[in-house]
Amino acid sequence: MILSTSFSNRAAVLLLASSLFLSGCVGVKGDDKEAPAPRGGKFSIAVFPIENLSGRAAPRGEIRESLIRNLKMEGFQVLDDDALEKFMARNRIRYTGGIDRVTAQALRMETGVEAVLITSIELYSEEIPPKIALISRLVSTGDNPVILWTDGVGLAGDDSPGILGLGLIEDSKTLMEKALHVLSSSITNYFLINKEQREGKRPARKFRPKIAYRSPEIGGGKKYTVAVVPFFNIGGRKFAGEIMLLHFIRSLKRFKNYDVIEPGIVRQELLRLRIIIEEGVSFADATLISSTLGADWILNGKVMDYQDYAGSWGKPKVDFSAVLIERKGREVVWNSTSHNEGDDGVFFFDRGRVNTAYAMASQMTQMVVKMIGEETKSVQGAKASKDRVK
């Protein structure tokens, strides 16, 4: 007997099974809870138009509107669209994936907002089961723009199917609202815990780099200012270099001993210096960039593979290298190669399976950053070339 694997047929079977299972539970009433009071205070935010790095069409306007609605429900003051559009037209702003110093100063002076929310779509698929991945960061305005908070979320409709598949999500809008609720709640929690981000869950050991070198010159416990340069993309996924940059910024911000420079400032400096990243950053360019930005380290690398899949069958793949160059010693203090697939270490009932490249890259980059900060030299490998990291 051949069983159909389509979601529509499965849904009908699950609906019948669930009705029989829950028939004895009629009359059980859920707890009625009042909606939480607004917690954002009087903090004012400008929400930039959404950056789409998914490589396909995505409802940018709908995502932004829903995000604004969630922020207002949390009590934040959001700059109205008319004022934001006039500001962007007046200052000729087209790039919304970051903010430079001049724009941050103008935004504070002309609108009075305290921060700008920048959100990028990494993945959006409406094919059943739907998938979505978003990365956001909150950057202060004024003379010295800094990243206050950054977080992301990657969800697939079949992440938690549960008993009889009752946890399956087949509606893309339902999944989108769930993802946006995660982001808005994360922003609120940042303000509730004295404006600090926690390190979060420890990444699984299987996401350790396959090969890694850590210089003994890296001092444990010291604080470093880091500029992350877009990774060189040699894979087939469009914008994979920009996506990997965002993952590393998010991972670095989870540790207190790293100050990460806003990528919009780094981008503007690269344009000003007319530096084009080709297959890696030379030591001369790294020294120039770090000197003008006041960075201790330049983080760069390559993306060899960054794959997601649509539908029910497939597995994500992430393959990248990461290189850390120190300004003072003009040397490579970290060099690693990481590669994982969504079914690594999965043997029974898909336990531990990862359904999005976002969820995998998030843990892989966290593991790299964690190992960079370790006190002991627990990794091995060979030093990279002194001329150019490739």
Image (tube, helix red, strand yellow):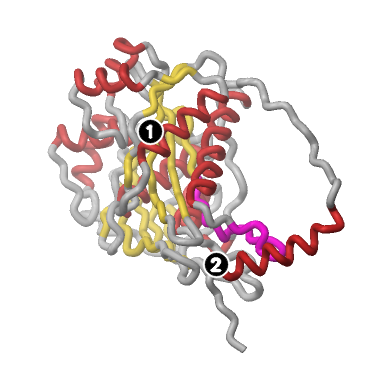
Vertical order, 305 against 232 (above or below)? below
Please, which residue is most extreme toward the bottom here? 1
Q: Are marks 1 and 2 in contact (CB under 8 Å)?
A: no
**How many neighbours does mark 1 have within 10 angstroms: few (below 14), some (14-19), or many (20 or more)?**
many
Q: Is residue 208 visible?
A: no
Vertical order, 352 against 140 (above or below)? below
Q: Which quadrant holds residue 199?
A: top right
**How many neighbours does mark 2 have within 10 angstroms: few (below 14), some (14-19), or many (20 or more)?**
some
Q: Considering the numbered disc 2 on the image, is that residue within a helix, a strand or a loop?
A: helix
Which residue matches tag 1? 118
Question: Who's the residue at 22% across and 56% down the image?
Answer: 279
Q: Which mark is residue 132?
A: none
Please, which residue is most extreme toward the left here? 274
Tell me the quarter of the image containing the N terminus: bottom right
Please state the horizontal and vertical placement of residue 294, each as a whole percent of the image.
31, 29
Question: Who's the residue at 31% across and 37% down the image?
Answer: 97
Mark in front: 1 vs 2? 2
Q: Which mark is residue 7?
A: 2
Amino acid type, label 2:
Phe
| Marked residue nearer the N-terminal end (1 or 2) | 2
Please state the horizontal and vertical placement of residue 19, each as a whole percent of the image.
75, 60
**Residue 260 in magenta stretch:** no
The span shown in magenta is: 153-168
Question: Who's the residue at 47% across and 34% down the image?
Answer: 66
Task: Choose between 379 and 201: the one closer to the eye.
Answer: 201
Vertical order, 9 against 374 (above or below)? below
Amino acid type, label 1:
Ile
